[in-house]
Image (spheres, rainbow, N blue to C red):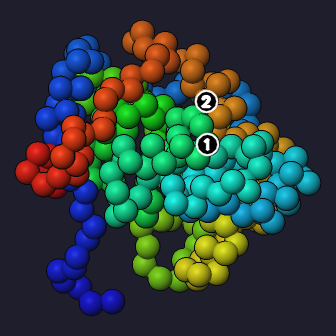
Amino acid sequence: MREGPFKESSYYYPGERIQAYMESLGTTEIYENQFLPAIDRKIAILTHDDEFDPEMFRIERSQGIRSTWFVLAERLEETIPPEADVHLHFDKEKSTLGEQIETYRSKLHRYPRFNRIHRLLWRANNFDFPLLAMSGIQVDSTLIGERPYRPTIEGRVLPIWEVPFSIADRAERFMACYSIAADSEVLFKDGLSPITILSHPFSVCARHQLISCFYEVLRLIRRYHYQSMDMTSFYDQFLRAYDPCGWKGEDHRVTIFPPAGARQDQKGKGES
């Protein structure tokens, strides 16, 4: 790999609307991210990106494993079973967030509550968190880390949770995705909870030459007696109830669709 300039995908944020949204939240004396207090249950949240994999889903169901699927808008197929926990995989290289949310809504007849950004293309906390929160996203899982938290920006605690992932498929090439530990079993031995896992579908691993963590994670969940949860169940049982500053889980979605003749990502109206 050669070092030097390269072309990186860019997304034009609706800067004025983000600023107006942030001002509408009001300020507090809080200046730290608000982390979820320790929970006394060992929880594993298995997640998958890009597309739905029927074979992987069948294996999980046969072992009593629940998971969440972050699916690209164009791959939301009618064949996905209704019991699957499916949410948005926002692709900044395809179209605006508003357009992808509308595609999701038109196909699944509901708005997405959770998201992970495709290729982990995260610009900055004060760009991405407000954009997602004002679009009605309640949980994001794009970042890498250990503990769920609500982000604080300039004294404003945003009405969105970040549930970072700790374990991911391994790659033989240089990628943005990684696991926090050299040996993922350490996290289970230490009783970290929740442990959020990013395991790509088998077909995605094959296309991108990823070494899947799927079977290893299933083994560790059984060995260390972790409870498997999808993101919806985890949110409903743990995140919704924790309210450090009076949010109470209300829907903070605002109008994100641009007026006729304009686009959300139109250069000159936002920040690149």
**In the figure, is residue 242 to the left or right of 2?**
right
Name the residue: 52% across, 27% down: 36
Res 1 label? none
229 vs 172, nearest the viewer: 229
- Find residue 108 and name its label: 1
Above or below: residue 48 compared with residue 261: below
Residue at the bottom extreme of this rendering? 2
Q: Quadrant of the N terminus?
A: bottom left
Instruction: Give the residue pinned by disc 2.
Output: 235
Camera-side mark, 1 or 2: 1
Q: How many marks?
A: 2
Question: As shown in the figure, which amino acid type bears the numbered disc 1?
Answer: Leu
Looking at marks 1 and 2 on the same chain, the residue that comes earlier in the sequence is marked by 1
Residue 64 appearing in the image: yes
Residue 181 relative to residue 18: left or right: right
**Residue closest to the eye, 77 or 64:** 77
Q: Position of residue 176 (x, y in %)?
A: 42, 67
The residue at 46%/16% (across/down) is 250
Secondary structure under tag 2 reads: helix
33, 132: nearer the viewer: 132
User: Is 230 drawn above or below residue 62 in the view shown?
Assistant: above
The image quadrant where one finds the C terminus is: bottom left
Q: Does 242 sit above or below residue 131?
A: above
The image quadrant of residue 212 is bottom right
Residue at 43% x, 64% y: name it: 119
Amino acid type shown at disc 2: Tyr
Q: Is residue 86 left or right of residue 17?
A: right
Mark 1 secondary-structure assignment:
helix
